[in-house]
Image (tube, grey):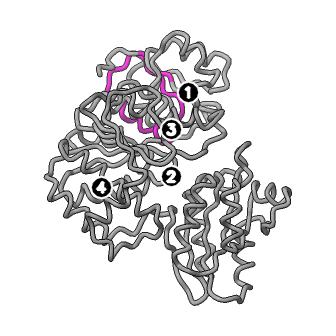
Amino acid sequence: MDLTGKKVAVYGLGVSGKATLIFLQDFALGSLLVVNRGAPESWGTDINGILDTFSCPINCLAEESQITASELSQSELIILSPGIARESTTLGMALQMGVSIWNELELAAQMCETPLLAVTGTNGKTTCVTFMGEVLKEAGCDPFIGGNIGRPFLDGLKERSDFGVILLEVSSFQCESLETFHPKVAGILNIFPNHGERYADVESYRKSKWLLTQNQDSTDTVLTGPGVGDDPFSSKSKKRDLTSCAEIELKANFDLSKLKLVGKHNRWNLGFCWEFLSAACPVLPCDEETLKASFQKVISQFKGVEHRLEFFKETERFAIFNDAKSTNWQATLTALEAVKEKELPIVLILGGQLRGHNDLPPEEFCEWVDNNHVTVLTMGESGKFLMDQGLSYHYLEDLQKICYFLSKDHMKKQTILFSPAFPSFDQFANYGVRGKRFKEIFECLN
């Protein structure tokens, strides 16, 4: 893709927006428009330092400015932050004018000839991508691992262009702004209700996930799991539903005696990983025998991903798990089913920012909690909401008060599961900050 002389806009200056600006430094653009929330002078010195390296005309505008929509419509290409919906009124004129609106994954893919592998889904995608990344490293495949986790794709390309393979985690928001993106193997792990703040219904959310496969052809593969359903875009790729067989395939091919991850869902996820990598083997710089041996080695070493059902610590009174990444009821129910394998009474800590719908627990969740005699402690915005709905949960405002409450509990040994089921933004900047704060506070709980 030649950007020489192009009128390019970067809309949103989060992680991917900054990575895009840094990547664009190497191109002789015709002009650069930068749009972000708030007045440009409030964007920070790091942004100013990046912009100072460009030789083309630069226009910086607040998202709220009355002229921003018109200026964006005069661009030839807009690189959009995944946190900004394409339905934003600020983009309305640009969409009407037929301006190309991509995200950084699409831009990077157009600059890269290395085979692409991509995974999306509601729950488990970070664990799967991280695990497969370790396998690919062990097998000598020299992978780039990133996208929605770790590093933006453009960061990797800025550094070098000769990776052996590209493995990406892709969010539903990122799927929306892909145009030619073409993974040789795509995975849609599962689909459960989520992101009610962005999608009107589950079907809209489901279709956004399937956009990952829209450019695949008959030489490509898509693997799916629970709730994914049929392809709404009728792509020509080979499709295989692993809902009922992923764990079976894992147990048939590997020794799980040293597996450190708990939960049936994690065993299913690893089975999905094996089928995914097997499908990708023809484009990998290693043979299947090496891949399988590397997979077995990583099974015996892998401890999971921070904040995703992370086994934090165990004391005489508590076994403590940090699942701060959970932002929906299904993720929390999955975590509950996993920690039940510890065969201890369970204390569940949940709560966060209200979504607007799907805020009340589904019947399946309530039945599981009641049948297994789970003690539920809540916090934050949704914690108060749940208390006001008459649920028999204990509302304790925040993590500090919950920790103090538990420190006074002299019952027999229990499992403490922090799996919020709601977004973090009522009390924390993101789930990572939430998880780190949980571990800081609960480090003293013995």
Which residue is depicted at the point 62% across and 21% down?
Answer: 90
Instruction: Report whether 218 appears left or right of 421.
Output: left
Q: Which residues are magenta?
A: 7-33
Which numbered disc, 1 or 3, marks the residue that appears first in the sequence? 1
Residue 323 vs 361, above or below: the answer is below
Residue 415 lies, with reference to residue 362, above or below; the image says below
Q: Which residue is mark 4?
A: 274
| Residue 159 image offset from top left, x and y in percent | 28, 42
Mark 2 vs 4, N-terminal side: 2
Point out which mark residue 123 bears. 2
In front: label 4 or label 1: 4
Nearer to us: label 2 or label 4: 4
Tell me residue 53's x, y (percent): 39, 31
Q: Quadrant of residue 367?
A: bottom right
Q: Is label 1 in a helix, a strand or a loop?
A: strand
Under mark 3, the amino acid is: Ser
**Image label count:** 4
Per the model, the C-alpha gap separating discs 2 and 1 is 31 Å
* Residue type at the position of mark 2: Asn
The three-letter code of the residue at mark 1 reads: Val
Is 76 inside the magenta-drawn segment? Answer: no
Residue where numbered disc 3 is placed: 172
Q: Nearer the viewer, residue 102 or 175?
A: 175
Q: Residues within 10 Å of mark 2 (few under 14, many from 20)?
A: many
Classify residue 105 as left or right of residue 379.
left
- The amino acid marked with disc number 4 is Trp
Q: Are marks 4 and 1 in contact (CB under 8 Å)?
A: no
Residue 303 position within the rendered picture, expressed as x and y whole percent measured from the top left: 39, 69
Q: Residue at x 61, y 67 (%)?
A: 418
